[in-house]
Amino acid sequence: MGKLINLLSVATLLLSTQSYSESLNLEQDRRYSETVRRVIEDSRRSGYSLLVNKQDREAYLFQNGSIDTTFNVGLSIKPEGDKLYEGDGKTPEGVYRIDEVKDGTPGKTSRFGLALLLNYPTSNDKKEFLEAKSKGLVPDEINSPGSYIEIHSGPDNIDWTIGCVAISEEGMSLLVKKLRMKSTVGIIGYLPENFQLN
C-alpha cells in the first residue's frame, strides 16, 4: 500500500511539473507571438521594422507587413534565454525601439562600425531585473540589467557578442538606410509553432 501511495505521489508530482512547464511554454509562446504581431503591425504603420529570431539565427526586415529581406545573425555567447542582468552574456528578448542609427557619418559610429542602438533596458526589463534581484537570482555584486545593446556589424555565423546582435556589414548597410530612430525591433527566442510570418 505504501509503495502505491509513493507511486501516486510521484505521478502527481510529474503531472503537476509537466502542467507547470506547459503553462510556461504557453506564456512564452503568447509573448513571442505578441512581439511578432507588434513588429509586423508597426511595419505597416511606419514602413519598416525588424524581427530577430534567436533560435533560427535570423533577422527579418519587414516592410508594410511583409518580409523584405532576411539576414543571418550572430548572437551573444549564451544565446538561450532572455537577458536578465549585466554580464550574463545573453541577448535580450522583447520589443524595443531604435534610440540611435549609427550610419558611419562623423560622430555616428559604434566600435563595430554601423549599428542600431536599442532602448534596452526598458521599464519592463528593469522591473524583471529588480524582481530577480530580490529573489536572489542575480549575483550580489551586479546592480544593473545592462545597457548599450546594439544590432551592429560583425560576424553573423557564430555567437560571439556579450549581448548584442551581429549582422554582416552588407546587411547593416541596408538596415541603417531603411530603419530610423524609434523604429521597432522585436527579439524572440523562437517562432511559436504554427505562426506564419507572411
Image: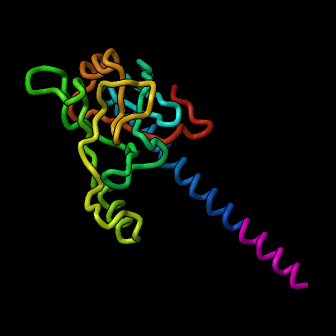
Picture residue at 29% right of the left edge, 58% below the top: 126
- Residue 119, visible in the rendered structure: yes
Residue 155: x and y in percent read: 38, 24
Residue 170 in which image quadrant: top left
Where residue 91 sits, quadrant-wise, is: top left
Looking at the image, which residue is at 26% across and 62% down? 143
Q: Is residue 45 left or right of residue 3?
A: left
Residue furthest to the right: 1
Image height of 12 relative to 42, above or below: below
Name the spot of residue 14 as percent of width and height, x first.
Answer: 73, 66
Magenta region, residue range: 1-14
Q: Is residue 76 above or below residue 130?
A: above
| Residue drawn at x 8%, y 22% as measured from the top left | 106
Residue 173 drawn above or below residue 8: above
Judge by depth and name the residue closer to the eye, 25 or 75.
Answer: 75
Residue shown at 56% from the left, 40% from the top: 192
